Amino acid sequence: MVLVAIIVYILIKVLPEIGWTFLSQSPSDMGRGGGILPTIVGTLLVTLLAVVIATPFGIGTAFYLAEYTRGGILTRIIRFSADSLAAIPSIVYGLFGFIFFVTQLGLGLSILSGGLTLAFMILPTLIRTAEEAILTVPQSYREVSFSLGATKWQTIIKVVFPSAMRGIVNGLILSVGRCIAETAAVVLTAGSALHMPKSVFSSVRTMAVHFYTLASEGISMPKAYGTAALLIILIFLINVVTNILVNRMAAKGR
Amino acid sequence: MNKPIKIVINNFDYYYNKKQALYKLNLEIQANEILSVFGPANSGITTLLRSLNRLAELNPEGRAEGEILLDGKSIYDEDVNVTELRRRVGMVFDVPTPLPMTIFDNIVYGPRLSGVKNKKDLTAIVEESLWQAALWDDVKDRLGMPAMSLSGGQQQRLCIARVLALKPEVILLDRPCSGLDPISTAKIEESLIQLKEKFTIVIAPHNVQQAGRISDRVAFMLMGKLIEEGPNEEVFANPKDQRTSDYITGRFG
């Protein structure tokens, strides 16, 4: 109920605000006028980069933990670290990203620094959700696969991974949502430049950061709500689309 | 009666950690016969079956000692290719376990792994295996359906077809009819009796009656030890060991 109330409230506030101009133009006058196109592009790029970097590592680690090292001391250390890291406030990741990527590696305030930092931030969640998904795949599937002459690798690729797909994708959606919604870590690493990014080394302002700036500095409440609504719609769309895709894949099997 | 010996088990022990599950087993299995290994729960029958295709070693706590020869060659030798061995010695489990894919994909899972890619060959394998498992008429029009949509009995026959598609030499069945209704059970028994023309079958029956109905020879196991083995009629008509006779007359177990 509360959730619906929040969404309805924002959408009502905002409907007059969102239009083609809002979606397709750069902001003018610090965000009081114009649209928010660069921030949409910025959000998508930073998130995409983070997910592309984190996913292979996350899923790889999860399979390593679940399939290759059941119950060892190393497994427990990795698991414990992942759980601890998942609970750390995002601004700490931001600070780490700022010191390491921005200053130390000299990447500057850029899409690249932001993406890398967010990748670190979502990695623990990705690992743990994927690992849980892999562990729920019935052991009997693995036995059947082995008994039909499959190697461990073939079993993982052909049976375990497809069966764990849905859970893994759920973790991925969760991570994407966190990236899109992130402010603190992004301000510190990707900056808050309002222009259109030219390369991965450009600084960008994501939608969440834009919203935060507009609202907290009292620049323009209507534009702030517009951004918020678009954020919600974006996350909603991503959820719907991935769900449809996963359902379609899963429908082939069961 | 003198068929060639397919499998020889020599002084075979099996341990889970320190707990011993099989004690000095000695048994010969002839080609093209159905051997029933029966006994009460916890007798080590599943462990024995899983040792024959080295599936038992998936359990990291397990340890085998002794020898099992398949066609005169030890399957525990270092140069044995385990995946190859498991193709030669196929297994059907107690619970029907279709993989979460279509009926077609389930059956060609094994052949695809060994490199069969041609659609025509795969279709031929599917049809032949389903015929042998007496499932073709039930599913010929819905090979693209998820295997999970079949009934329990059909699922188990699918699992048998899936093993047959490997073109194995030996088929192990671990209480394959335990969750099935009498009609499905009868169908599976019927196909097993036909299949022994081509394969060597080792089955853990789900009760003594089933052992009596389908087997050429039977072996009685108790607490990890082989108590008695011999031709079906002999063991059931006049068992040599008191414990065997107690069990088959239903006095315990």
Image (cartoon, coloured by chain):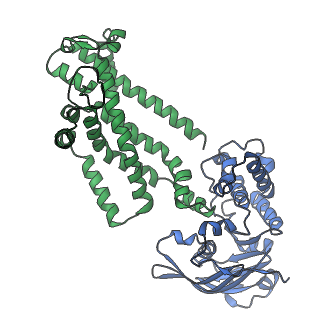
Chain colours: A green, B blue
Task: Choose top left, top right, bottom left or bottom right for residue A122.
Answer: top left
Q: A49 or A226, which is in the foreground? A: A49
Query: What x and y, as percent, mark residue B28?
Result: 72, 83
Furthest residue to the left? Answer: A217
Instruction: Quarter of the image for the C terminus of chain A: give it.
Output: top right
Q: How many marks are shown on the rendered structure? A: 0
Q: Residue at x 21, y 42 (%)?
A: A105
Q: A11 or B128, which is in the foreground? A: B128
Instruction: Quarter of the image for the N terminus of chain A: give it.
Output: top left
- Position of residue B243 relative to residue A37, above or below, is below
- Can residue A116 be seen here? yes
- Can residue A254 be seen here? no
Q: A222 or A31, which is in the foreground? A: A31
Query: What x and y, as percent, mark residue A233?
Result: 37, 23
Q: B247 or A53, which is in the foreground? A: A53
Q: Taking A61 as reference, is B147 left or right?
A: right
- Position of residue B234 relative to residue B112, above or below, is below
Q: Taking A247 as reference, is A59 left or right?
A: left
Query: What x and y, as percent, mark residue A113?
Result: 25, 37
- Position of residue A113 relative to residue A125, above or below, is above
Query: What x and y, as percent, mark residue A160?
Result: 52, 52
Q: Residue at x 44, y 41 (%)?
A: A169
Task: Choose top left, top right, bottom left or bottom right for residue A194.
Answer: top left
- Position of residue A200 relative to residue B150, above or below, is above
